[in-house]
């Protein structure tokens, strides 16, 4: 359920959070995002258990079922999952208004309680749909799970409310992971043209270099990597990207 820690049936103790990811982990970027998995490990017998969770509502509106994303009528059970409103709130552990805070959502995600964390954010978004921070946080958690389509939708909602260059970078990464390099490239081009912060400019150059490298545009990639290194000489990943380009092409001296 991932609304509370998974309890080991053999040892009768709460498991510890191990990892979480889109399930099944399909290599096809167009695969439908329906379920994610949370893995718990027993601290005594070390057995691992997989907890499958439904995606739920990506863009909740007032009246959305926070369990499955359905649209029940007022006072009616959800036609998709069958849960009544009060039952749904209790199941997701958000029946008390004091449980619905941004800080408690962040703590839930840190503990692996993804379903509980998403339910808190969704409840907050139902009453505060113009809060860019809530949309950005939800997008970040989706991206951690590699639910990139859902992440992109949330990032777009956040960016429509408040400009944020680093969130533009996150959106571009989500699009790239959806096999949309054109959409990602357009974002990086715009950031490089208008970004004031050197950090943002350098990250955009490095990430654009990755897209050029993947497309075989070696000279364009080299130019971007070198500019990223010039602007941020202390960021290790810029050198790693540059080295990878040469290593993949067996240009060993340049890689060294």
Image (spheres, rainbow, N blue to C red):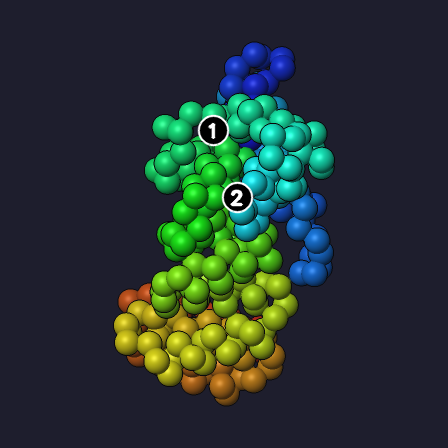
Q: Secondary structure at mark 2?
A: loop
- Residue 166 spot, x, y in % from top left: 38, 64
* Quarter of the figure that contains the C terminus: bottom left
Residue identifier under label 1:
94
In this rendering, is residue 177 above or below 129? below
* Rendered residue at 40%/54% (across/down): 130
Name the disc covering residue 190, or none.
Answer: none
In this rendering, is residue 128 above or below 132? above
Work out which residue is located at the far bottom of the displayed protein and give it.
Answer: 219
- Residue 25 spot, x, y in % from top left: 67, 49
Could you tell whether 48 is left or right of 15 in the image?
Answer: right
Taking depth in this image into account, of 173 and 159 the one nearest to the observer is 159
The quarter of the picture where residue 40 lies is top right
* Rendered residue at 62%/63% (across/down): 178
In this rendering, is residue 116 above or below 216? above
The quarter of the picture where residue 105 lies is top left
In this rendering, is residue 185 above or below 45? below
Alpha carbon distance from label 2 to label 1: 16 Å
**Residue 107 visible in the current orientation:** no
Residue identifier under label 2:
62
* Rendered residue at 52%/77% (across/down): 185
Taking depth in this image into account, of 56 and 188 the one nearest to the observer is 56
């Amino acid at each position: 359920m991932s609304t509370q820690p998974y309890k080991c049936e053999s040892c009768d103790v709460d498991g510890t959070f191990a990892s979480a990811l889109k399930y099944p982990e399909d290599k096809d970027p167009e695969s439908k995002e329906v379920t994610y998995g949370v893995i718990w490990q027993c601290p005594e017998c070390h057995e691992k258990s997989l907890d499958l969770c439904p995606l739920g509502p990506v863009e909740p509106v007032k009246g959305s079922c926070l369990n499955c994303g359905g649209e029940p009528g007022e006072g009616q059970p959800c036609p998709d999952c069958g849960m009544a409103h009060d039952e749904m709130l209790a199941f997701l552990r958000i029946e008390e208004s004091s449980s619905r805070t941004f800080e408690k959502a962040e703590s839930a995600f840190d503990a692996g309680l993804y379903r509980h964390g998403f339910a808190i954010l969704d409840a907050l978004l139902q009453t505060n749909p113009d809060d860019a921070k809530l949309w950005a946080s939800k997008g970040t958690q989706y991206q951690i799970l590699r639910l990139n389509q859902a992440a992109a939708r949330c990032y777009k909602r956040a960016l429509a409310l408040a400009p944020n260059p680093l969130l533009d970078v996150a959106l571009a990464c989500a699009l790239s992971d959806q096999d949309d390099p054109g959409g990602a490239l357009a974002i990086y081009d715009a950031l490089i043209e208008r970004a004031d912060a050197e950090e943002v400019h350098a990250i955009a150059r490095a990430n654009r270099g990755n897209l050029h490298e993947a497309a075989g545009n070696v000279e364009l990639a080299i130019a971007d990597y070198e500019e990223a290194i010039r602007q941020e000489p202390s960021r290790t990943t810029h050198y790693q990207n540059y080295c990878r380009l040469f290593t993949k092409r067996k240009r060993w001296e340049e890689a060294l």
